[in-house]
Image (spheres, grey):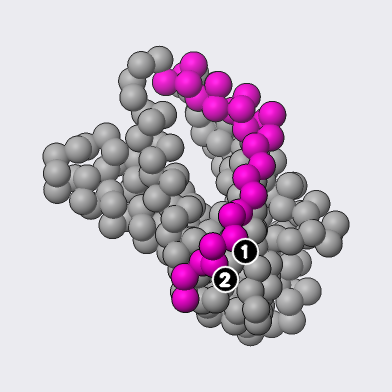
Amino acid sequence: MWIRPNSPRVDVSPGFLLLLAGLFWLDEGVGLLPWGLLACLFHELGHVLMAAACGGQVRRLSLTAVGAELSIVYESPPSYGRDMLIALAGPAVNLVSGAIFLVCDLLLPGVLSFGIGAFNLLPIQPLDGGRVLYGLLADRLDPDWADRLMTAADGCLVGALAGVGVIVAVHYANVTLLFTALWLLAGVLHHGRRETGGGTGWTGRNRTA
């Protein structure tokens, strides 16, 4: 089932524009940013196509400082299994496109595609790996317990990444991992506020992508 012809709404936050400007400044002509944006586009298209095959319809694309959020509605709530398939579709497209790039001797876009796909498989909400882990837990436990376990796991994993990031920053003067951990923390907090506020979110049976 393909997406209905209703035009989805696109929201671009000032935080996203600042993030884009910062990445453009850090790129310094290397060429990472265009290929990275293309890999992210492929990633989101994977989610959209799988959600459409599961009966979903895109209503809104929100670009914020913590990433892209696809708001998708369904005529009937998808099962946890289908929700996990939708979550895995994005990284799967990155892995396939990365392999194609490498076969075509395009090393940089191939590595970026693999990296973005692998990064999104980290078991942290709201990343795709976190959605899959939540689906596995919620399908076997009470959803409230799944939420509690995911909250604890998110805190431990992000805290561990931040700790390693501090060590790397002090000893090697490289703050990339630390900034990544802080970005993930912002995403976790944003995800938590959205869930407790009653808005649509990605980690549910009738929520968003």
> Is 8 in the magenta?
yes
Span highlighted in magenta in the image: 1-27
- The x, y position of residue 64, in whole percent, is 65, 39
Q: In the image, which disc is placed on residue 72? A: 1
Looking at numbered disc 1 in the image, what kind of residue is underneath it?
Answer: Ile
- Which corner quadrant of the image does residue 181 belong to? top right
Residue occupying the point 44% across, 46% down? 41
Q: Is residue 90 left or right of residue 175?
A: left
Please provide percent x and percent y for residue 48: 49, 61
Left or right: 140 with respect to 173?
right
Residue 78 appears in the rendering: yes
Q: Residues within 10 Å of mark 2 (few under 14, many from 20)?
A: many
Q: Secondary structure at mark 1?
A: strand
Residue at 34%, 45% (x, y): give it: 113
CB within 8 Å, label 1 to label 2: yes
Counting residues from the start of the chain, the first of labels 1 and 2 encountered is: 2
* Picture mark count: 2
Residue placed most toward the observer, 134 or 64: 64
In this rendering, would 76 be left or right of 23? Answer: right
Quarter of the figure that contains the C terminus:
bottom right
- The answer to whether residue 72 is above or below residue 14 is below
Q: Secondary structure at mark 2?
A: strand
**In this figure, which residue is indicated by the disc labeled 2?**
56
Residue 205 vs residue 126, the one in the foreground: 205
- Horizontal and vertical percent position of residue 185: 67, 43
Residue type highlighted by circle 2: Gly
Residue beneath the point at 85% across and 57% down: 197
**Vertical order, 70 against 14 (above or below):** below
> Residue 51 versus residue 5: which sits nearer the camera?
5
Residue sitting at the far bottom: 140
Residue 30 colored in magenta in the image: no
Residue 112 % position (x, y): 34, 40
